[in-house]
Every structure is written in C-alpha cells, then in structure tokens.
Image (cartoon, rainbow, N blue to C red):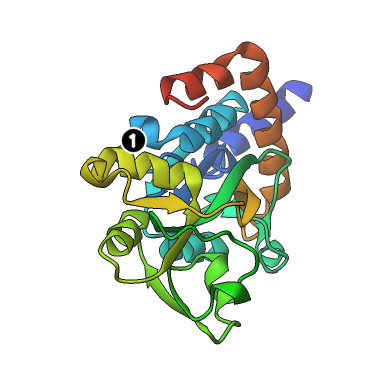
Amino acid sequence: MLKKMLVVIMVSIMSLPVFVLGSEKKIVISGCEWEPYTGKSLLNKGFFTEIAVKALEKAGYQVDVEIVPWKRALETSKSGDSDGLLGASFTEERTQFFHYPKYYWKNAVHFFVKKGKKITFTTLEALCPASVGILAGSFYEEKFRQIECIKLDPAPAVNLNIRKLIAGRFDYIIESKDSVNYIMKKEFSNDIDAIEPMLPAYEIDRIFLVFSKKNPNYQQISDDFDKGITMIQESGLYVEILKNHGIH
C-alpha cells in the first residue's frame, strides 16, 4: 500500500506544470541608467546590480535584470510585472507597493551648480526662484513640485541633466554625488570642472533593492536577499565586487 501511495505522489508531482515547480525561484528585477549603480554598459550592469544579483543567486534564485527608463521600472515593479526595483529610495508612499529589505546603500545627494557661483545650500526655498533638472519619476519630483517658485525640468537620464546644466539651461540639478562624478569623468571629461556640488549635501539618502508586494512571496524573497547579502559579505565577494567596480 505504501509503495502504491509513493507511486501516486510521484506521478502527481511529475504531472505538475513546469512553471509551478521552482517558478518562485525565478525573478525579474528592474533598474534604470543610473551609473555607477546600474546601467546596461557597465560591468555586470553596475555594482549595485551585481551585489543584488549575487546575493539572490547565493539564496538560490535565478535573476533576470531589465534596464529601462526609471518611470517604466517603477511602474512595472508596482504592477508586479517585475519582482523588484533597483535603486529605490525610501518613502512612506512606496511601502504600499514595495517591501524594503534590511540592506541598503548610503547615497549623498547634492544640488549641483555651475562652478563659481559660491552658493551654500540652506533650504529649498532659499534657492528660489530657480529651475532644477531632475530625473523623471524621482520621488524628489513630487516633493519639489509643492514649492511654487521652483520650476522642474524632468529628464529620463542623469547625463541629459548634466549636459543641460553645463549649457546653462537651468540653475541646478539634484542628483547623487557618486553618479554625477562618475558620468562627468566618463562623458564630460573636457568640462570636468564646469559644475560642482553645493555644500552641505541636501541629504544622505538610502537606496534599496525593493520587492513588489504583487509577488505573493515578497517577504520570503526579501528575507532570502538579506541572507544572501550576509553570505557574500562573509565570503569576501561583496568587497571584491566593489573593488572590481572601482568603488571604495
């Protein structure tokens, strides 16, 4: 009788659709062109991407990465077409759609100006009247729209905002210092001293790989991701990734 039961169980398992077996271990995460964190042309699509992928792989997941404009990455992750979103800052509103793991990367965010203006950052209102270049879909976009004397100029990529600032198209851009420094060296080496960050930093942001709550397994994926982070940190792979990308 026991032998017959085992045969029935095995036949039942083998008859299940392939996508049911292990499908929860195959996930898609989305990000945008945000060098040096994420980007199609970067080594392994950027250091933040590689950290995320290696941690998830250590936890037993197969990971596909999509690099698309930020607004699309945000929306596809909200809807569940993508299981995770790379490079997301924390906002209370986003907790409706996303689960935040423990791991994050610290990110210094500055306003940038053309060199020589000698402006110290105090408050947003003190910048007024001003035109500001911003990444389209950034949570700063909604926040700054509440200040009437600030005119926003959204763009789909950071390098476009940098180019416009150098050309004098607007007064400021707000962006990650790491990102601006990287792109300036890569694409604007002839104008490397054309812009500078306002001091002090606007804020020290935290960026995450967040997981879509549309995936019923989001809590387990997030927990596994944090365990994977611990594994790559303890093995030395985490530091090796940063070193390979020139991040210190």
Q: Is residue 245 left or right of residue 77?
A: left
Q: Is residue 152 left or right of residue 211?
A: left
Q: Residue at x 70, y 34 (%)?
A: 226
Q: Disc count in the image?
A: 1
- In the displayed structure, 97 sits above or below 59; it is below
Q: Nearer the viewer, residue 17 or 139?
A: 139
Q: Amino acid at mark 1?
A: Leu
Q: Tell me where residue 155 sits by quadrant.
A: bottom left
Q: Position of residue 88 (x, y in %)?
A: 57, 53
**Residue extending farthest bottom:** 148
Q: Position of residue 235 (x, y in %)?
A: 62, 12
Q: Residue at x 73, y 40 (%)?
A: 102
Q: Residue at x 60, y 47 (%)?
A: 207
- In the displayed structure, 194 sits above or below 47; it is below
Q: Position of residue 209 (x, y in %)?
A: 59, 45
Q: Nearer the viewer, residue 159 or 38?
A: 159
**Residue extending farthest right:** 1
Q: Residue at x 52, y 61 (%)?
A: 119
Q: Is residue 90 left or right of residue 172?
A: right
Indicate the quadrant containing the N terminus: top left, top right, bottom left or bottom right.
top right
- In the displayed structure, 28 sits above or below 144; it is above
**Residue extending farthest left:** 190
Q: Nearer the viewer, residue 192 or 180?
A: 192
Q: Is residue 65 visible?
A: no
Q: Residues within 10 Å of mark 1 (few under 14, many from 20)?
A: some
Q: Nearer the viewer, residue 153 or 117?
A: 117
Q: Position of residue 212 (x, y in %)?
A: 61, 56
Q: Tell me where residue 171 sits by quadrant.
A: bottom left
- In the displayed structure, 11 sits above or below 17; it is above
Q: Which residue is mark 1?
A: 42
